[in-house]
Amino acid sequence: MQLLEKLATDPGIVAIMKERELVVGTLGELDPIDDRLMKKKEENSGGCVLGYNTNHGLRIDIKLRSNDLSGFRSYPELASTLIHELSHNWVGEHNLLFWSNFAQMRAEYLYTHSQLRNSSIIVHGKKTAELAGLDKEKLENVFDFIMSELVQEMAQHGLHPNMIEGPIRQRIQELEENSKNSSNGHRLGEATYTTDNTASSTRELVLAAAERRAREQQKKEGDER
C-alpha cells in the first residue's frame, strides 16, 4: 500500500496526470499468483507482464514484487511501468503512436524531477529525484536515457526508438522552454472532477478524457497532412 501511495503522489506522475488530463479510478497491485498463471502468455509475447490497464484507466494494476516474491521491484522500474500503463489510456496497441506517447510522458516525468532537484523543495530530508531513484546523469541526459530505455522495450514489438526520435526531441525542447503549462487533470484514484461535459462516474470520466485526447490527436494529424 505504501508503494502504491508513493507512486500515486510521485510529483512526476502527478505532472503527467495534470498535463494530459488523465484519470485513473483505482491503482492496485498485480496479484503475484495471477502473474504466475500468465507465464505462458509472457513466453509467447516475448516479455514479462508488469502491469494491466483495464478500460482505459478505470483500473491499473502494477506488478510490485520480484518474480521470486522475496522483495519488491526497484522504484524506477515501478514508475516506468505505471507510465507505460498510463500511455494505454490513449493507445491500446504497442505501435509507434503508443511509444511516442510513452516516451514523451517519460520526458515529462524526468523533467519534473529535474526541475524539483534544482529547487529548494525537500521531502523527508531528500530531493524528490533521490526518492525516485534518479541520479544526476539521467536527469541531465534525458534524451539519451529515454532512447536507451526504449531499445529493448520496443524491440519486443519489432520497432526501434530511432523511428520516433523526432517527437521525443520535440517534447524535450518544449519542456526545456517551459512552453507547456496546464492546471487541469487529477491524481490517481480521484473519483470526480469538473470537465466541459460533466460525467457522473469514473468510467465516464476516463472515456471522456480518452475521446478528447483522440480528437486532439486526429486534428493534429490532419493539420500536418
Image (cartoon, rainbow, N blue to C red):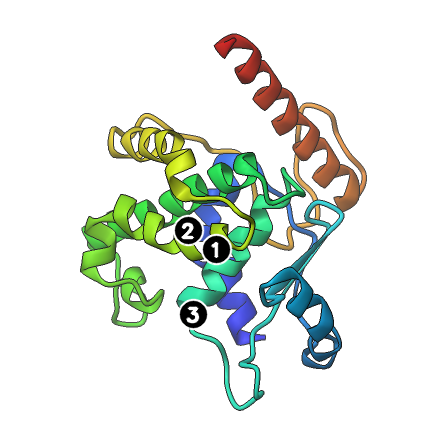
In percent of width and height, residue 179 lies at 32, 25
Q: Quadrant of residue 38?
A: bottom right
In the shown orientation, is residue 183 left or right of residue 125? right
Asked if disc 1 and disc 2 are in contact, CB closer than 8 Å, the reply is: yes
Identify the secondary structure beneath mark 3: helix
Count neighbours of disc 1 (C-alpha within 10 A) and say few if under 14, some if 14 to 19, many if 20 or more. Answer: some
Q: Is residue 20 above or below residue 118?
A: above
Q: Residue at x 59, y 21 (%)?
A: 216
Which secondary structure lies at badge 1? helix
Q: Earlier in the sequence, mark 1 or mark 3?
A: 3
* Residue, disc 2: 150
Q: Nearer the viewer, residue 10 or 109?
A: 109
Name the residue at 33% across, 28% down: 170
User: Which residue carries the number 1 mark?
Assistant: 153
The quadrant where residue 41 appears: bottom right
**Real-space CA distance between mark 1 and mark 3, rounded to the nearest whole angstrom:** 18 Å
Dots 3, 2 in contact, CB < 8 A = no
Vertical arrangement, residue 215 with respect to residue 151, above or below: above
